[in-house]
Image (tube, helix red, strand yellow):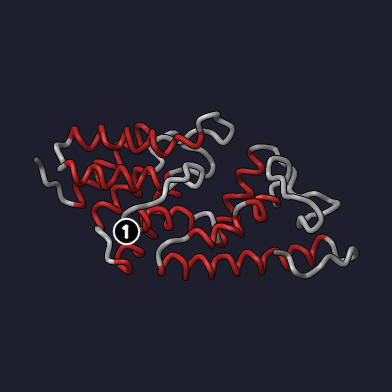
């Protein structure tokens, strides 16, 4: 078995990501950098294994299916499998490889795999934090634009009298998923940051309401 340093592992991860990972507007190199940085901060706060967390965070989107792919919910498991193969080629300990694989498989919202280790909880929370706050909103609108979805429903922008439909309206994604993510965080540090970012998003929605529909008198409670 080989015991590579964290720096050596990160360098190898960079090579794999740059050559193997399909990138889109929401899952690119910048997304990985943010998730890794957040995961490392959470790992320190939660006393998680920094090496497992860092490698899993770098490789968590190694396989990334498009939003409409019929097997999108299986992407994280495919990424875990591919990461395991690559790590095994480096002759790393099997326990380390399995820990990284579980953290990758469990990070996905759509996969619905419960994280069983603190490292998996940290990576999951770090990835979900990138869907919240200012960066989360920027990613949401960028994806909506790329998919040519309308920004909002003119008749009911804030889903006050209808079920949200984020296949049709980008703003609906806030109500269908983003504002609910806060309840899914599993680390204390992650929950605290999620609460702050979610509150910022609610403030944004309040400002948006003020700007686009003052004549309609929408209810100020936007979710």
Query: At 84% across and 62% down in the image, what residue appears?
Result: 213
**Residue picked out by circle 1:** 118
**Vertical side of 66 occupied by 187: above or below:** below
Q: Secondary structure at mark 1?
A: helix
The residue lying toward the viewer, choosing from 193 and 95, is 95
Tell me: 11 left or right of 35: left
Residue 75 position, x and y percent, is 44, 35
Residue 180 position, x and y percent, is 59, 58
State the image quarter where residue 159 is shown: bottom right
Query: At 27% across and 66% down in the image, what residue appears?
Result: 47
Tell me: 144 left or right of 67: right
Query: At 75% across and 69% down in the image, what residue appears?
Result: 221
**Vertical side of 85 occupied by 141: above or below:** below
Query: At 73% across and 41% down in the image, what residue appears?
Result: 168
How many discs mark residues in the rendered view?
Answer: 1
Packing grade of label 1 (10 A; few <14, some 14-19, many >=20) is some
Quadrant for the N terminus, please: top left
Quadrant for the C terminus, please: bottom right
The residue lying toward the viewer, choosing from 183 and 87, is 183
Tell me: 141 left or right of 46: right
**Vertical side of 137 occupied by 217: above or below:** below
Residue 146 position, x and y percent, is 63, 39
The residue lying toward the viewer, choosing from 216 and 118, is 118
């Amino acid at each position: 078995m080989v015991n590579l340093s964290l720096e050596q592992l990160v360098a190898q991860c960079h090579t794999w990501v740059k050559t193997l990972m399909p990138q889109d507007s929401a899952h690119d190199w910048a997304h990985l950098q943010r998730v890794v940085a957040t995961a490392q901060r959470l790992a320190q706060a939660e006393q998680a294994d920094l090496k497992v967390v860092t490698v899993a965070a770098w490789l968590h989107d190694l396989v990334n299916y498009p939003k409409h792919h019929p097997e999108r919910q299986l992407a994280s498991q495919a990424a875990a499998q591919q990461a395991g193969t690559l790590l095994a080629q480096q002759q790393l300990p099997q326990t380390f490889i399995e820990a990284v694989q579980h953290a990758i498989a469990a990070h996905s919202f759509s996969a619905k795999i419960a994280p069983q280790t603190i490292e998996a909880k940290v990576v999951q929370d770090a990835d979900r934090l990138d869907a919240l706050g200012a960066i989360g909103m920027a990613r949401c609108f960028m994806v909506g634009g790329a998919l040519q979805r309308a920004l909002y429903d003119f008749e009911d922008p804030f889903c006050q009298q209808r079920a949200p439909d984020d296949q049709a309206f980008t703003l609906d994604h806030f109500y269908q998923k983003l504002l609910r993510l806060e309840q899914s965080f599993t680390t204390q540090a992650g929950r605290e940051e999620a609460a702050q970012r979610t509150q910022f998003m609610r403030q944004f929605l309040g400002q948006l309401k003020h700007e686009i529909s003052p004549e309609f008198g929408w209810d100020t409670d936007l979710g």
